[in-house]
Image (tube, helix red, strand yellow):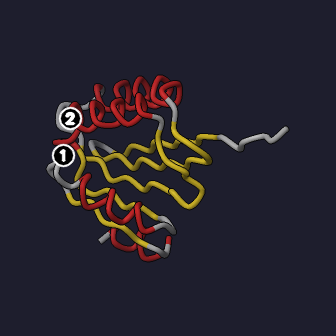
């Protein structure tokens, strides 16, 4: 019997109308994960008229998405895409770099892939 690791941690910090969202995923993203993430993001951003969001996504242990979760991710991007200024994807897989490029098609801000977390954080704060 094998067990698959799965976990999700999310952090949201707010200063005025600026938000910093951090997300770390272990394993494969599921629809249930988005049932947790989406209301948190919706609630945090609804409190501000024109929120500006910078996000760090740690994908070093991400193995992908379930099909329904990929659809959930697409819908979340459409709903809040104009509110994201920068999304830094920190990862260690070639497909994550490609995903970052595709993600930039659906949000108004910048999306960039990094292999080093310090470089990702420096870019977000610049």
**Number of numbered discs overlaid on the protein picture:** 2
Spatial separation of the CA atoms under disc 2 and disc 1: 7 Å
Is 9 left or right of 124, judged from the image as shown?
right
Residue 31 vs 113, above or below: the answer is above
Q: Quadrant of the C terminus?
A: bottom left
Q: Mark 1: which secondary structure?
A: loop
Asked where in the image residue 112 lies, by quadrant, the reply is bottom left
Q: Is residue 71 above or below residue 108?
A: above
Residue that extends furthest to the front in the rendered view of this protein: 1
Residue 82: percent from left, percent from top: 16, 42
Residue at left 25%, top 31%? 48
Reading the image, the residue beneath label 2 is: 78
Please tell me which residue lies in front, 100 or 65.
Answer: 65
**Viewed as shown, does residue 34 lie left or right of 52?**
right
Residue 40 vertical position relative to residue 104 in the rendered view, above or below: above
What residue does disc 1 label? 106
């Amino acid at each position: 019997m094998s067990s698959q690791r799965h976990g999700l941690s999310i952090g949201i910090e707010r200063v005025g109308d600026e938000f910093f969202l951090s997300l770390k995923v272990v394993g494969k993203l599921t629809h249930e994960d988005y049932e947790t993430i989406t209301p948190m993001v919706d609630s945090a951003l609804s409190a501000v008229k024109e929120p500006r969001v910078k996000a760090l996504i740690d994908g070093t242990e991400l193995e992908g998405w379930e099909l329904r979760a990929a659809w959930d991710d697409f819908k979340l991007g459409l709903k809040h895409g104009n509110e994201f200024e920068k999304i830094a994807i920190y990862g260690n897989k070639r497909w994550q770099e490609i995903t970052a490029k595709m993600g930039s098609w659906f949000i108004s801000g910048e999306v960039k892939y990094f292999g080093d977390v310090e470089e990702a954080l420096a870019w977000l704060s610049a």
